Image: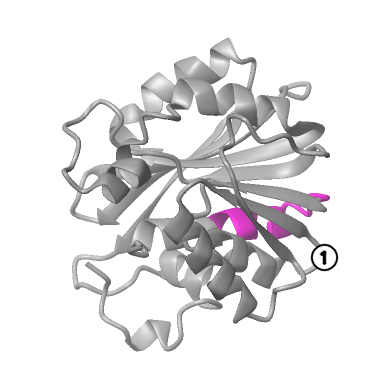
Amino acid sequence: MKVTTDACLFGGWVADEVKREKLRVKNVLDVGTGTGLLSLMFAQKNSLATIDAIEIDEDAYQQAKQNVAGSSFVDNVNVIHGDIKTFSFSKKYDLIFSNPPFYEREIASEDQKKNTAHHHSGLVLEELLPILKANLADEGEFGLLLPFKRHKEVKKILVTQNLFVSKIVFVRQSTTHDYFRVMIMGKLRAEGGSETTIDEISIWNGQQQYTKEFRQLLKDYYLGLTSQPPLQ
C-alpha cells in the first residue's frame, strides 16, 4: 500500500497533539491501520501507550504485522484482522484515530483493493462515527483525516452524534494551493467555555521546500528531512 505525505502529516500531528496537550493516553485504537504507519508513528512518540490497530483487508493486515514485527514497537502495537463494524473490543479507548475512506460517493476503481481502501462501501462515515463514539472512553479524544471538500458534511454528522470538535487544521499541498485535507481532533463533549481552535498548515512552500511547520511535525520520522525534496 502507498504511504502518502498527508497521512504522515496526520500521524505526526496526532502524536504531537497528545504530547503537547499532555493528554493521558494509555489505550489507543487505530481504525483501518493499513500498513500500520500511524500506529508506529504514535508509538514512537508515546511509548507508554498500547495501540490496537484494526484492518479488514488481509494483505494490508499481513503487511502491518510485518512492519510492526520489524520495528522497535512490537510490544506497543497489536495488529488485529477484523471488521470494525462487528469486532467486539474488551475496553474503551483514550484515543481513537482514523484515516477513513476518501471517495465514498465517487466512481469506483476497477482495482478491488483500491475500492476497499478508498471507497469501502462496507464502512462509510455515517457508520464510522457512531462506532468511534461507542468505543471512546468518557474523557477520550478522537482524530480524523478527511478530504477538505467533506469537512462541512462531517461536522454535521459529528453534531448528530453529540461529538465535539476541539481543533481543526486545514491542509494545503503548498502555500500556493487550495486546501485539500482537513485534520480534526475532538471529544465526546465540550467542557465549559470550550471553543473549536482553527489552524492551517502547508506541506511545502513556493520554493518547493518543506515548510517550517511540516518539518517540525515530521523531523523525528523523516531521515534527512531538511535535505529531501517534497514528496509528490
Magenta-colored span: 13-24
Residue kind at label 1, given as amino acid type: Leu
Q: Name the quadrant containing residue 133.
A: top right
Total marks shown come to: 1
Looking at the image, which residue sits at the far front? 58
What x and y, as percent, mark residue 193?
73, 22
Instruction: Tell me: residue 57, above or below residue 49.
Output: above
Query: Which one is nearer the viewer's eye here, 103 or 171?
Result: 103
Q: Nearer the viewer, residue 25 or 226?
A: 25
The image shows residue 8 at horizontal and vertical percentages of: 44, 63
Residue 139 in view in this figure: yes
> What residue appears at the point 37 percent right and 56 percent down from the top-left corner?
6
Residue at x 38%, y 84% (from the top left corner) = 226
Tell which residue pokes out farthest to the top in this image: 160
Q: How is the image coloured?
A: one colour
Is residue 20 found inside the magenta-colored segment of the image?
yes
- In this rendering, position of residue 52 left or right of residue 103: right
Q: Residue at x 54, y 60 (%)?
A: 38
Q: Nearer the viewer, residue 50 or 146?
A: 50
Q: Quadrant of residue 77?
A: bottom right
* Picture layout, residue 82 above or below residue 7: above
Helix, strand, or loop for circle 1? Answer: loop
Question: What quarter of the picture does the C terminus occupy?
Answer: bottom left
